[in-house]
Amino acid sequence: MGMTGEWSALPSANSLWAATAEPARDFPVFAGEHQADVVIIGAGYTGLSAAHHIAQSGLSPVVLEANRPGWGASGRNGGVITAKFRLSFRQIDAVHGRDMARRMYEIAHESTDIVEELVSEFGITSANLTRTGQVKAAHNETTLRAAIDEANWMTREMGSAEVRILDRGGVREETGSDVFVGGVLNPGSGGIHPLNYLRGLADGLARRGVPIFQESPVMKLRRDTDGIVAETPRGVVLARQAIIATNSYSDLTGATARLQRTLIPFRSAIIATDELPRNLAGKLMPTSRTYTETKRMMRWFRMVDNRVIFGGRGAFGKQDSHAAFDALRKAMVGIFPDLADVPLAYTWSGLVGMTLDSVPHIGRLDDRTLFSVGYNGAGVAMSSLMGRYLAALVRGETPELALLDARRMKAIPFYPLREPAVRMVAGWYQFLDAIGQ
Ligand SMILES: Cc1cc2nc3c(=O)[nH]c(=O)nc-3n(C[C@H](O)[C@H](O)[C@H](O)COP(=O)(O)OP(=O)(O)OC[C@H]3O[C@@H](n4cnc5c(N)ncnc54)[C@H](O)[C@@H]3O)c2cc1C
């Protein structure tokens, strides 16, 4: 079976995270025959958290990773941790009612809590997990009013922890930028070194004896009389159940490509500056939170090791492009003019998996195959939590999955047209942002 997708590309190589991470443990390449209760395909947060929770249940997992653990989105994301979905709780409430909104709210908060639990359970201090909050900064009065309205609704209707409304001066103090008219501070959010978190999980599991294999792509997944067989180039794993944890990289091989059809791949890009001189570093983002714009293109920024990290939409298609990084740089300098002459030290990108209904999906492909995908660009915490729910499904339990239940999932209609569709939607959002709507 042929390899497709980004197989040979190494876009994470030029990331700040790769440059500053703890050394990666070498995991063996899978060979021969191995029996396990559950074979897990993909060593990102979804796969590793599932392996941990399955091992804790007294069952035996084995993890097969096509590249090295963390090669996918889990090793190269922005490390912004938030208790929310792309679909707002207010939208959920309006369409699906109060009980659904409450359950989704609970799931969102469980997801940020589990990151803390896993970091503590495996002692991953190098992940530098902080819970210092997030500022949502508005470019104009229309988006500010919408952000404040949403925040007030969350406090009133969901009993959300007190959010703080920031005026123009308040958001200037928070960000060090003059361009915002106001904003909202959400104290529950946080930040993490995403690759150290991933490596800490992989290392901790390996020390506990959970078998993890690198450079071991599952080329084929097939049923046999008793269970399911995962074939890699040098061997086979025989298991009772399989978990597909390949998210937006599900088309690396044909074995998991079925899931790609439920996702719209969207490239997300990140730039990081050189270390700033001390006087400048002290001026920008002095409150050390994470920051997002109210714009639809989901730009965000944070300060790590005296560097500004700035993320947003990447290039269309399979590879990085200078144009996308230049556009990010221009947006960054628009917010922080002092950065005009500061060189970029790192530029990198990866794919996020968007879904038609803007929420992730977890469940069964069939009686022996489980999956969890579609984090819509907000998956650090959520994929960590889905590992716990996947383990519950493996044990035959029926957790209340609310809108995440895969039975609600819709396949992408006109799938071959998805890339032009992404361009069209992105172009429309950019237009709305430009006219301040
Ligand atoms: C640039 C970028 C920035 C982001 N920023 C944020 C952020 O700030 N906050 C946030 O919450 N979320 C963010 N996200 C999203 C978040 O990173 C993802 O939702 C999350 O990491 C998904 O984890 P996962 O384990 O499901 O998938 P991944 O980490 O992508 O792992 C999938 C793995 O499956 C492997 N694989 C694929 N096919 C096979 C096969 N056949 N056999 C074996 N292995 C296979 C791949 O090699 C890969 O390692 C960002 C994503 C990107 C790309």
Image (spheres, rainbow, N blue to C red):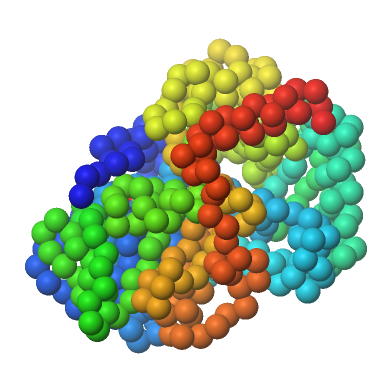
Indicate the quadrant where residue 234 lies.
bottom left
- Corner quadrant of residue 93: bottom right
Residue 36 pos. (x, y %): 24, 78
Residue 394 x %, y %? 42, 80
* Residue 76 x %, y %: 43, 43
Q: Is residue 77 left or right of residue 171?
A: left
Q: Residue at x 74, y 54 (%)?
A: 88
In the image: residue 227, left or right of residue 405: left
> Where, quadrant-wise, is the C terminus in this rendering?
top right
Inspect this view and state whether residue 88 appears: yes
Looking at the picture, does residue 303 appear above or below residue 66?
Answer: above
Q: Which one is nearer the viewer's eye here, 222 or 246?
A: 222
Residue 58 in the figure: left or right of residue 74: left
Q: Position of residue 166 (x, y in %)?
A: 85, 41
Q: Is residue 44 visible?
A: no
Total number of numbered labels? Answer: 0
Residue placed most toward the observer, 340 or 51: 51
| Left or right of 300, for residue 102 | right
Q: Residue at x 55, y 83 (%)?
A: 398
At 57% from the left and 30% from the top, the residue drawn is: 423
Q: Residue at x 68, y 39 (%)?
A: 292
In this rendering, is residue 220 above or below 276? below
Say above or below: 68 vs 58.
above
Question: Closer to the camera, 30 or 173?
Answer: 30
- Farthest residue toward the top? 341
